[in-house]
Image (cartoon, grey):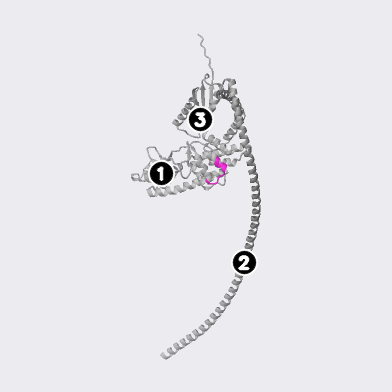
Amino acid sequence: MNITIIAGTLCLLLGAIITWVILNTVLKTKSKQIIENAAKEAETIKKDKLLEVKEKFITLKAELEKQVNARNSKMQSQEVKLKQREVMLNQKQDELHKKRTEIESVRENMESQLEIIEKKKQELGKVHKMEIERLEALSGLSAEEAKERLAQSLKEEAQTSAAAFINEVMEEAKMTANKEAKKIVVQSIQRLATETAIENAITVFHIDSDEIKGRIIGREGRNIRALEAATGIEIIVDDTPEAIILSGFDPVRREIARLALHQLVQDGRIHPARIEEIVIKVRKQVEDEIIETGKRTTIDLGIHGLHPDLIRMIGRMKYRSSYGQNLLQHSRETANLCATMAAELGLNPKKAKRAGLLHDIGKVPDDEPELPHAILGMKLAEKYKEKPDICNAIGAHHDETEMTSLLAPIVQVCDAISGARPGARREIVEAYIKRLNDLEQLALSYPGVVKTYAIQAGRELRVIVGADRINDVESESLSNEIAKKIQDEMTYPGQVKITVIRETRAVAFAK
């Protein structure tokens, strides 16, 4: 039995060995075939790649030859141009040499002529002196006395003629220019809507109940301190029912504080870490809103091609005010007025609208340099590649630089119209009263003025003069002088009308 098992096992082993040998032989044969096939395929791929490389080499070589030929032709043309320029320069040099020779000869002639003129001048001086001495002997007056009398008479005659001429010119100008100017200004104002003034120091945040005030204050005031530190705004929580006051002169910070409070109250989780997180998030939202407001404004007005920084500054105008007037609404209104007025005058309305929108851009810079806002706005416009006439209109709208284009007076007038119309701006009562007193005192400083009255909210100044001290011609000159002095020394909205009144009264009593 054991022998049978051993024999069977040996047979199985022998069969396995034979099978392994056969398989090994077959595998070697197949692997050899595979290697041969791979070598053939590699040789084919190698030949294909060599052909591709040769084609690319030929293509690149042809392109390089074209470039070299083009450069050579360009250099040849430049050499020809240089030679032509050299010939022209030589010709010009010869011409200059001829002209220099001619000038030298002319100069010599002029010098000889000047010598002759000088001699004649000396002779004339002697003759003139003799004639003066003869005239002094005949008239009994010295030359200086005669000059003074003649100058005085000519001065009086010139003053009378000049005053009469000024009156004629002024009347003629009023008959023609005032009518047209009023027509254009009135049409421009009537075609535009007006905006109301806004508060510029506080924002009132309304809440549903007074219980929220305690959560906003927090334990020992930590929440309100964290909110004030994060926003830079003073938060006033007092007895005012269902209201919290946000106080600060930066409208952007007040808006950030208002939106942050709104989100914190809605969320309900109010603690220092959450406050900082919400304020950072809201500040990013406000910055995005500023950019979006600038883009929307330029699209609404049809103004294109503005620099992104200028668009951001336009958006920041939404949160700035001037004398209670929203700066963005004022700039939009000025832009529309400028476009209307420019169209009436036959100028480019798009340029005028662009200048009107950007005229107060110096009030919202990223930094605060010590410059007037008009000059700063002009420098910003120049920095962002605006056209020279637009830059000049921005810088000259408060007469802080010289006007060099017709856009400048249009922007100045439209800015005054937008700021001076009723309800546009608020003015502190003390400053208003001081301005009226300054107007009256300025007119009283002139000799011959008896009384002065500032009326129509300071837009008209009535000046009463003594009839025995000033005549009609002098009263006309006085009104012009007072107007010029007010324009040079005072700051005022719109324009001030100066009316000089001179009257003679005869009084008698019947007893």
- Left or right relative to 310: residue 113: right
Residue linked to disc 3: 486
Front-most of 329 and 507? 507
Which numbered mark, 2 or 1, is in the foreground of this view? 2
For disc 2, the neighbor class at 10 Å (few under 14, some 14 to 19, many from 20) is: few
* Mark before the other along the chain sequence, 2 or 3: 2
Q: Callout 1: helix, strand or loop?
A: loop
Q: Which residue is mark 1?
A: 232
- Disc 1 packing (10 Å; few <14; some 14–19; many ≥20): some
> Which quadrant would residue 235 be assigned to in this image?
top left
Q: Which residue is mark 2?
A: 61
Task: Give the amino acid at mark 3.
Answer: Ile
Residue at the spot 64% in from the left edge and 41% down from the top edge: 106
Label 2 with label 3: CB-CB less than 8 Å: no
Asked if 366 appears above or below 118 in the picture, the reply is: below
- Out of 77 and 501, give the one closest to the viewer: 77
**Quadrant in the picture for the N terminus:** bottom left
Callout 1 amino acid: Gly
Task: Using the numbered discs, state the Cα–Cα distance from disc 2 to disc 3 in whole angstroms.
Answer: 81 Å
**Pick the front one: 370 or 281:** 370
Label 3 with label 1: CB-CB less than 8 Å = no
Residue located 51% across and 24% down the image: 463
Q: Residues within 10 Å of mark 3 (few under 14, many from 20)?
A: some
- Part of the protein shown in magenta: 383-392
The spot of residue 440 in percent (x, y) is 48, 26
User: Marks 3/1: CA distance?
Assistant: 41 Å
Q: Position of residue 58 (x, y in %)?
A: 62, 68
- The label on residue 500 is none
